[in-house]
Amino acid sequence: MNSLKEQYTKLIPLYTGALANIKKLLETLLSLDKITVHTVQGRVKGVDSFLQKAEDYKEPFLEITDYIGLRVICYITSDVEKVCKIIEREFDIDKARSVNKTSGVGIDRVGYESVHYIAKLKADRASLPEYIFMKDYVFEVQIRTILQHTWAEIEHDRNYKFSGIIPDSIFNSIQKIKMARNYHARLKRNPNKTK
């Protein structure tokens, strides 16, 4: 395990540089497409987190895909879809390891929702001087709305893995939030139509 720790510790400065490059690139791409998001976050997996996760893999340096993790938090669902299109257009996506966790949660249930892409730079971009050091790096990009993010944070921070039926009082509040979110999305698509 010490060898793994030493190897990973040496890679952290490179991963940190790669994270800064990818984050700036994502922010630029969003700006060029005129998409306003709540935030673009990023992190490099910490040593302890890496070592804990590495226990589950035979070849952790080849199998773990989230050394570098980014999260794009959007205001509304339609923006999530737009961001997904940008990610798919601008990066090489590992479709077998990417996942859309936004479907499957029924209207009377609540749970984790997010789109997760496992990606790397396309060859033409990776050949540029500022990116060449990270041409083989794989990273994860998560895209979700701010409401989905709030639920994910509650679930993660409180280790609250609720997937059962929601009590009526909470269900009614969630339905109101969903209706407001959907109304806002429709209004944004067609500002002249209020019904």
Image: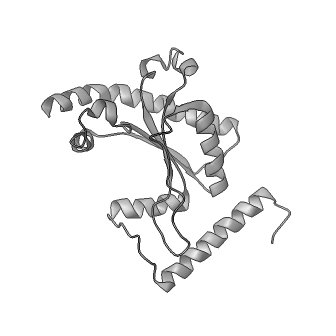
Specify whether 9 is left or right of 126. left
Instruction: Count numbered badges in the picture.
Output: 0
- Residue that appears at 38% across and 31% down: 16
Rendered view: 138 above or below 125: below
Q: Extreme bottom residue here?
A: 168
Q: Residue furthest right?
A: 192
User: Which quadrant holds the N terminus?
Assistant: top left
Q: Residue at x 46, y 64 (%)?
A: 151
Q: Quadrant of residue 67?
A: top left
Horizontally, residue 79 falls left or right of residue 119, namely right
Locate residue 51, reporting x and y percent.
Answer: 22, 40
> Quarter-wise, where is residue 185 in the image?
bottom right
Q: Residue at x 52, y 79 (%)?
A: 171
Give percent across and percent down for residue 136. Answer: 42, 23
Residue pushed farthest front? 96
Q: In the image, residue 62 lies at what x, y percent?
A: 32, 30
Q: Work out whether residue 191 or residue 161 is closer to the camera in this orientation and state it.
A: 161
Apparent side of residue 160 relative to residue 39 in the rendered image (left or right): left
Height in image: 195 above or below 145? below
Q: Quadrant of residue 17?
A: top left
Q: Quadrant of the C terminus?
A: bottom right
Q: Residue furthest left?
A: 2
Where in the figure is residue 40, as x and y percent of width and height?
52, 44
Task: Identify the colour scheme used.
Answer: one colour
**Eyeballing the image, is 107 above or below 85?**
below
